[in-house]
Amino acid sequence: MQEHSDGVEAVPPVGRPRRAVWAVSALVAVLAVGAGAVWFASGGDEETPAATEPAAWSTSEASAAPTPSELPSASPTPSPSAQPSVQPSPSKSPTKVPVRITLRVPSTLDGIAKSTESVGPVPTELKQRYVQAKWVSGAYGDAESAGGKKIAFYAATSTRLKSPATEMQWLTQNMADDGFAGFFSVSTGSFGGAAKCGHQEVLGSVYMCAWADSGSIGMVMLWDYDQNEAKAAFPRVRAQIERRA
């Protein structure tokens, strides 16, 4: 991928069929024009968050056994009894505490109330790539209103993720297949990893921002946000979804 001088990344076209991983066109159409049903079935709630402890962040404690004391050698000339030498115990290396990642569906997201509708099932390609993942999802905003800010998200924890760069490359490629373009990097705050947003206009403006780190991934769709608003909103939204301890 190449980046222009303004920081916006151009994603080259691909020769394979468009797979519509997130069926965003249908979702945008439903929410933007205020249809009666919304493409949503919640994958989690505040009482049943998804959580995992990434194995890569858990280091076992290692300790070495002390060397046995040496006995004094015999001498023909009587001498005071020798004290056995004592080897100091090697210091123990500190144990790294596993990082526990919890994902939640808050009652509001970026100040927008949770919708009475729900987000549909996790798209097939996401489930196939992240087989062991634990998913949550949520929708926010008034589905009956053609205008106004709305948010939807999918997020998952997993102990079997590859590098953040590898996951982000896969996610942005699938977003590009769905018609998103103009990708730009966004802040990951204190969480680390990688995050990018892309833009699409189908009966309305929508930004999709994705993140990937060593133990979680997520996709956030932002309607009626301009680029600067989306860039600023993403770290806030992620911080309200993801918790670490």
Image (tube, rainbow, N blue to C red):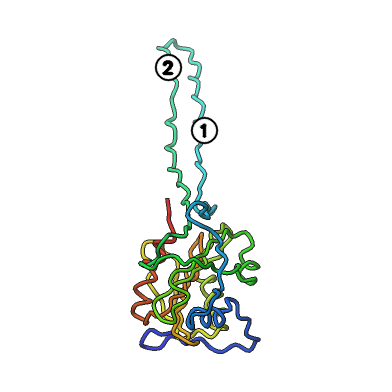
Q: Alpha carbon of mark 1 to alpha carbon of mark 2: how far?
A: 24 Å
Image quadrant in which you'd find residue 185: bottom left
Q: 8 above or below 121?
A: below
Query: What x and y, as percent, mark residue 10?
Result: 47, 87
Q: 160 above or below 124?
A: above
Residue marked by disc 2:
82
- Identified at 62% across, 59% down, the residue is 132
- Identified at 50% across, 61% down, the residue is 214
Q: Secondary structure at mark 1?
A: loop
Q: Amino acid at mark 2?
A: Ala
Q: Nearer the viewer, residue 11 or 81?
A: 11
- Identified at 47% across, 58% down, the residue is 104
Q: Nearer the viewer, residue 227 or 57?
A: 227
Residue marked by disc 1:
65
Viewer-side label of 1, 2: 1
Q: 98 above or below 139?
A: above
Q: Secondary structure at mark 2?
A: loop
Query: What x and y, as percent, mark residue 85?
Result: 43, 24
Query: What x and y, as percent, mark residue 88?
Result: 42, 31
Q: 3 above or below 76?
A: below
> Badge 2: few (under 14), some or many (20 or more) residues near its Cα, within 10 Å?
few
Mark sitting on residue 51 = none
39 relative position to 86: left or right: right
5 relative position to 198: left or right: left
Image quadrant in which you'd find residue 228: bottom left
Q: Amino acid at mark 1?
A: Ala
